[in-house]
Image (spheres, grey):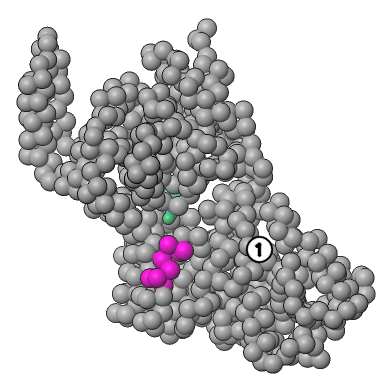
């Protein structure tokens, strides 16, 4: 029977005890565990399977947590979690109070930094190394980045700086030629050229073979061989970009061959200058369905291991799907409409658009800042760009939204997906800040549809609007069935009364318009007559509507899937104050001033008091307090 190793590993120190020739067995055990757990919990399978050997080799050769290993995005680091004392808890991956799907320094001392957004690893690594040097702390720093990281600007800012600082910094470039979809752009082509340069690779192999045949390799021979290799490299792969930036470049090597990895990392780990090791891996390695379809197994839903089929067949409609369909319908009529994504084509529902209008579809790589300014430029020259982007990634482009879109007053539509809590991806991915960070920018219209039908109409409105327009919608499914209605424009800044109330009104957005109605039904049973307004526009607010519902100082309750600070409730409060209605009691429900953990959406809404039960309780106690004493504005 083959010996097993994984169950004896409780820290990276235990990895070092395993005989080198047995490491492939350990890697297989890790893979099996990852496949088993992700099949139950969902998660980033394909990237994690591809990185198993890199992670095992790093823990075999370096001394974490003394040496710092930093992951870019961190979605590939499941093996790292397993090898750093979390093997047993790994089965709780992405569950509430369980193991986070991304490295998290509050979860383990081996996770050096919280990650989840791309392109940070080189900057973080360089920052840590610089601080360690200044504080005379020994230790190596290794940043692991994916090839798609090199589509993002911050990676180059960091490489440029690191090359200049000349520190003994190791960057491992894990190249699987994929982002979530196929990687894009000039850098990707360049890396591909390095990998596939047949003459260079053949010559390099021949030189190594030749050297191995020389019995005692003297210092001079090695030096000559390095020079020879370098000159060949320069001849065949001219102007190695990394070397020009000040890095020593090594590779490409097979990143799924643990022996090759250990050999090369051993030989470069003590380099005194910035070093980049280019390794080639296979996304989904070791699990056939993921190897064959790495895109669907990038962020996998729970699946049946034997077939790779989803464990649950669902036929729900997501806002993302509605958006994708509506955009195609609009683009058929309006040839100026173009779609822009920052490496999130399928996640943002643009697949159909890409197929139907390939010339009007732009995947710019993981480059949100560029995506927005690129859209600004296109809009200036007469096109109608739709930037389809996740709320949390738009945070990257704050200045671009302000300077290159709103200040220019150009008609860019931001279709902001994952607005609100997202669930199991956790705090790096919750899109709960956008209402606050967008509504303070002059000229920006900010809207949230109550359901799929309204999303279609808002999209149509935005395409015909002459200025910046943001529509945010959640990861959630739509709360009501689609009606086969034509898209109708909605006058900007108009709210909709869903239900009149005589005791108070709830002003809210998105799915909470429906949840609020459930709450009002329950409150009605207790003799409270509370109305519901679909505010729809966070900016401009429908002031006439607000005036109507606060008549005679009727209380207002605002509900939003956003932080309370500076969000929708704040906007309503400011408006009431500015209009001089100082005696209107206001209760704001939303997300408090804290980062929300990971978990299933219903659990998180419950945690934040934003499920129907939490909302009902808050409103009841608010109305009770009002009747017993005079209160004006509170937030819960
Ligand atoms: C700023 C930002 N934009 C988009 C994403 C979504 N995202 C997660 S992983 C990924 C692709 C990463 O590709 P790569 O770094 O090459 O790693 P691989 O998954 O191929 O191993 C993207 C676009 C993100 N995490 N951060």
Instruction: Choose top left, top right, bottom left or bottom right for residue 595.
Output: bottom right
Is 1 left, or right, of 167 in this rendering? right
Task: Name the image quarter holding the C terminus.
Answer: bottom right
Secondary-structure class at tag 1 = strand
State the image coordinates of residue 178 (x, y, percent, origin top left): 36, 44
Q: Residue at x 77, y 87 (%)?
A: 583
Is 203 left, or right, of 536 in this rendering? left
Is 158 left, or right, of 326 in this rendering? left
Instruction: Choose top left, top right, bottom left or bottom right for residue 419.
Output: bottom right
Q: Which residue is mark 1?
A: 591
- Residue extending furthest toward the top: 1
State the image coordinates of residue 212 (x, y, percent, origin top left): 15, 15
Vertically, is 515 above or below 439? above
Vertically, is 119 above or below 613? above
* Camera sees residue 334: no
Q: Does the stretch in magenta take in 469?
A: no
Q: Residue at x 47, y 45 (%)?
A: 113
Instruction: Choose top left, top right, bottom left or bottom right for residue 255.
Output: top left
State the image coordinates of residue 263 (x, y, percent, origin top left): 28, 22
Is 305 left, or right, of 378 in this rendering? right
Q: Residue at x 29, y 55 (%)?
A: 157
Does the Cβ of the disc 1 residue fall within 8 Å of ligand 1?
A: no
Q: Residue at x 66, y 63 (%)?
A: 592
Binning the other alpha carbons within 10 Å of mark 1 as few (below 14), some (14 to 19) or many (20 upward) gives: many
* Camera sees residue 67: yes
Tally of numbered discs: 1
State the image coordinates of residue 218 (x, y, percent, origin top left): 10, 16
Closer to us: 3 or 464: 3
Region of the chain picked out in magenta, as a range: 394-401
Closer to us: 375 or 427: 427
Q: What secondary structure is the stretch in magenta mostly built from? A: helix
């Amino acid at each position: 029977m083959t010996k097993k190793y994984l169950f004896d590993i409780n820290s990276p120190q235990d990895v070092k005890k395993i005989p080198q020739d047995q490491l492939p067995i350990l890697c297989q055990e890790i893979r099996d565990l990852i496949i088993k757990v992700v099949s139950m919990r969902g998660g980033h399978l394909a990237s994690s399977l591809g990185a198993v050997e890199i992670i095992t080799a790093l823990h075999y050769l370096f001394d974490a947590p003394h040496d710092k290993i930093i992951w870019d995005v961190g979605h590939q680091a499941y093996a790292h979690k397993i090898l750093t004392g979390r093997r047993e808890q790994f089965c709780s991956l992405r569950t509430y109070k369980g193991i986070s799907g991304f490295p998290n320094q509050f979860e383990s001392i081996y996770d050096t930094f919280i990650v989840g957004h791309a392109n940070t690893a080189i900057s973080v690594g360089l920052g840590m190394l610089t601080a360690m040097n200044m504080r005379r702390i020994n230790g190596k720093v290794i940043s692991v980045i994916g090839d798609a990281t090199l589509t993002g600007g911050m990676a180059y800012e960091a490489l440029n700086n690191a090359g200049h600082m000349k520190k003994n910094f190791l960057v491992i470039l894990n190249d699987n030629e994929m982002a979530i979809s196929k990687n894009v752009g000039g850098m990707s082509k360049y890396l591909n050229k390095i990998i596939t340069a047949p003459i260079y690779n053949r010559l390099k192999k021949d030189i190594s073979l030749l050297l191995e045949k020389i019995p005692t390799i003297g210092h001079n021979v090695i030096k000559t061989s390095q020079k020879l290799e370098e000159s060949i490299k320069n001849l065949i792969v001219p102007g190695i970009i990394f070397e020009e930036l000040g890095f020593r470049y090594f590779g490409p090597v097979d990143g799924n061959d643990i022996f090759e990895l250990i050999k090369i990392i051993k030989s470069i780990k003590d380099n005194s200058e910035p070093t980049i090791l280019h390794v080639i891996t296979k996304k989904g390695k070791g699990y056939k369905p993921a190897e064959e379809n790495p895109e669907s197994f990038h962020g996998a839903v729970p699946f049946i291991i034997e077939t790779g089929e989803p464990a649950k067949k669902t036929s729900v409609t997501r806002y993302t799907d509605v958006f994708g369909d509506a955009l195609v319908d609009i683009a058929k009529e309006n040839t100026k409409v173009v779609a822009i994504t920052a490496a999130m084509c399928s996640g943002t529902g643009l697949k159909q658009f890409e197929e139907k209008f390939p010339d009007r579809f732009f995947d710019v790589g993981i480059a949100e800042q560029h995506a927005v300014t690129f859209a600004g430029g296109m809009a200036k020259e007469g096109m109608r760009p739709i930037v389809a982007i996740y709320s949390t990634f738009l945070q990257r482009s704050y200045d671009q939204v302000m300077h290159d879109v709103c200040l220019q007053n150009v008609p860019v539509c931001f279709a902001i997906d994952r607005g609100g809590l997202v669930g199991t991806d956790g705090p790096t991915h919750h899109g709960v800040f956008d209402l606050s960070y967008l509504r303070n920018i002059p000229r920006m219209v900010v809207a949230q549809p109550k359901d799929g039908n309204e999303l279609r109409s808002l999209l149509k409105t935005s395409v015909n609007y002459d200025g910046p327009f943001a529509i945010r919608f959640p990861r959630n499914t739509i709360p009501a069935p689609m009606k086969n209605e034509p898209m109708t424009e909605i006058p900007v800044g108009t709210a909709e009364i869903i239900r009149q109330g005589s005791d108070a009104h709830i002003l809210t957005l998105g799915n909470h318009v429906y949840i609020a109605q459930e709450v009002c039904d329950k409150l009605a049973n207790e003799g409270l007559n509370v109305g519901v307004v679909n505010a729809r526009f966070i900016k401009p607010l429908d002031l006439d509507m607000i005036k109507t519902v606060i008549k005679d100082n009727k209380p207002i309750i605002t509900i939003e899937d956003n932080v309370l600070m500076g969000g929708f409730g704040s906007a309503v409060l400011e408006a009431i104050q500015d209009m001089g209605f100082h005696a209107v009691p206001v209760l704001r429900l939303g997300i408090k001033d804290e980062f929300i953990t990971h978990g299933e959406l219903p659990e998180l809404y419950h945690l934040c008091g934003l499920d129907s039960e939490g909302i009902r309780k808050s409103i009841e106690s608010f109305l009770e307090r009002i009747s017993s004493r005079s209160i004006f504005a509170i937030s819960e």
